[in-house]
Amino acid sequence: MPSRVFGHYTLRRLLGKSEATMIWLGVDSRTGGEAMLTLPRVAPPDRRRLDLWLAAARRAARLDHPQLAPVAECGAHEQWPFVAVDRRCGVTLDEWRLQHPPKVDECAAWIGAVLRGLAFAHDAGVAHRGLQLCHLLINERGQIAVMALAVAHDEGVAGPDKVAARPSPVALEPGELRAHRAGAERDVLACGVLLHGLLAGAPALEQADVGRVIARMAPRGRDLVRLPWQTPQPVPDALRAIVNRSTSSQVRLRYRNARTFLGALDGWREAFDADDGGPVARLLDRLRTVGPLPALPGLAARVQRVTAIESQRTDEIAQHLLPDLALSLELLRTLNSAHVQGTQVPGNGPVLTLRRVVALIGVDGVRQAANTLRVWPGPLDDDAAAALRTSIERVRLAGHVAQALRPAGYDAEVTYLVAALQNLGRLMLRYHFADDAEQIAQLMTPMPAGSGDGDAEQPGLGEEAAAYAVIGVDVESLGAAAARHCGLADDVLHMIRRLPVDAPVRKPDDDAEWLRIVGSAANEAVEAIGGGSAEQATAAIARVVDRYGRVLKINARAIHDALTEARAALRSGRTSSAQAAEVTLEQALDEATP
C-alpha cells in the first residue's frame, strides 16, 4: 500500500478501524520515530465541531495513569483532528495475538487492566466511547494501556461532547452528567464484548466492530451475546458467569461501572491463581480478626442462664446455646481445636453437637468462648445488620424444618446444625461482604413484566452465577473456608455443602448423605416461601416435593406441617430483638399455606 502524507507524518498502514475511528501507523518526519494516529472516520463538518473534538482529546490527554497510554501529540491537519501515541508504548492487542495466543487468565488480566484505567478516566469525567481491540496497547512486559480516549463521539449515546470542553473542577449540568454516565456504561459494556471475543476466539456476533455489536444488543437490538460452550480453551464457570453478566440481554443485570466489573474479575483471578486467594483469602483474614459472626443481642443473659442450670443435663444447656449461631460456631471451633472425636449419629460420624462440647469444656469453657465474640452487630450499619438478622432467622427456620423432616433415629441437634451450616457461606457473605451480598441479591431478583427491559418478566440470575458475577467465587466456597477455619472435618464439609439444584436426588448410602439431603430439602423449602405470591410459593413447594418426596417420603402436607412446626419452634425460642426479622418469615409462611 503506498504511503500517504498527513502533515508531518507519513502514514504507512492501517492498524484498525471502526465506524467511528481509524488507527494508522505513521512515521514522524521530524524525528523518524513511529507513532500510532487515531482519527475520526469522518472529519468534523465545521470549526466548532473540530474545536470540541480537540478539546475532548486534549482534556483526556492530561490524564496520567499506568493503564492509559500517554499522548505524544494532539492536533489537526486540513480539518482532520488526530491523537498520536508513540509506538514505543506497545503494539495493538490485535497485532500481539497473532504471535502470542492468549490464555484464559491472560484475557481476564488484560480486560482487568483496561477497566482499571477506564475507572480512573471515568472518575475524571472522561469516557472512551469507541473502544476496540486496536485501542489496547501491550508492551513487551505484557502491560496493557488504553489509547485514544474521548475521540469517538456517538451522538446517539452521549451527544456533543460539551463535557470534555469544560475545565475539570466545573460541576456538570444534569444533561451532561447523563451523557457522561452513558459513555462510561458503554465503555464497560465494550469491555465485556471484548472479553467475550478474546475467550471465544472470535468476535461477538461475528462482528469485529464493537460499536456494531453493541447496536445489535439490548436495549437497541435483540441479539444475544453469550459465551459458547465450545471455546479454544476451557472457560471456568466463574469466569463464564462474569463474562455473560457483562453482556447480559437484561440491561439491569450488567455491570454499571468499571469498578464493579473489575472487582469481579480481580476476585476470580485471585482465586484462580491460588486456592486460598481472592475473596476466600480476604474472608479468612477477617475470620481471624473479627470472627465468623457477631453474637446475637442478649448473649450475657443466655450465658447466665446456662450458669444457673449447670447441674442439669447438657442437652438442656445446649438448647439455650443453639439459637445463637455465632456462639455455636465458636463452641464447635473450640471442640475441634481440642481434637476431640466422638459419635453422635449411626455409623461413628463426626462430633457435631453442642451438648458434647458442653460435656467436654464445661460451663466455664462456654463462658470463655462467649467472651471472644463481638457484640451485635459488629461493624455493620443498621441496614446491613437488619439484613444479616433476617438471614440468621431464615437459617434457624431451616434448621427447625430439617428437624421436622428428619428420618427416625437421627439426632435432632445434629440435623439442625447441618441444615444451618449449609448456609454458612451466605451468612459469611452477609456479614463480611455486606455490599456484595446486596448486589448479589439484586441480581437474583426477577423483574416483573413491563418494568424493565421489555414487556415480559425478566428472571434473575441463579445464586451461583450471581456470586460468580460479583465476587468471582461461589457462596459454597466461602462456607467451606469458614468451616475449615472452625476446624470441621472433611466429612462435615461434605454434609454442609447443599445438593446442586440440577442434581437428581438418590437414596443415600450413609448417614452423612442422609443429613445432607434433609438439610438441603429444608433449606429449599424455606426458600420456597421466601418471596413472591402464594401461587408462586405453592409451586415452589411442589418442586421441592418432586425433588425430595421419593427419598424422604414426604408430600406437600408434610412440608407445610414442618414449616408450621418450625415457625412455632422459632417463635418460642426467639428474643424480642428477633421479632422484626421473623415477621417477614411468618407472613411468607401464611401466604404459602394451601
Image: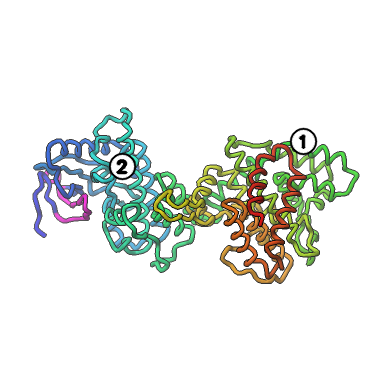
Q: Magenta segment, principal secondary structure?
A: strand
Q: Quadrant of the C terminus?
A: bottom right
Magenta stretch bounds: 12-32
Give x and y (percent) for residue 197: 34, 60
Report helix, strand or loop for mark 1. Answer: helix
Report helix, strand or loop for mark 2. Answer: loop
Residue 407 appears left or right of 2: right
Residue that protrudes farthest toward the front in the picture:
594
**Which residue is labeled 1 in the image?**
300
**Amino acid under label 1?**
Ala
* Residue positioned 73% across, 60% down in the render: 405
What's the distance in space between the residues labelled 2 and 1, CA to CA? 55 Å
Residue 13 appears left or right of 144: left
Q: Is residue 418 above or below residue 120?
A: below
* Residue positioned 70% across, 37% down in the render: 577
* Residue positioned 46% across, 50% down in the render: 264
335 or 515: nearer the viewer: 515
**Amino acid under label 2?**
Ala
Give x and y (percent) for residue 491: 69, 62
User: From this viewpoint, is residue 473 visible?
Assistant: yes
Q: Quadrant of the N terminus?
A: bottom left
Q: Earlier in the sequence, mark 2 or mark 1?
A: 2
Residue 302 in the magenta stretch? The answer is: no
Residue 100, label in figure:
none
Residue 127, label in figure:
2
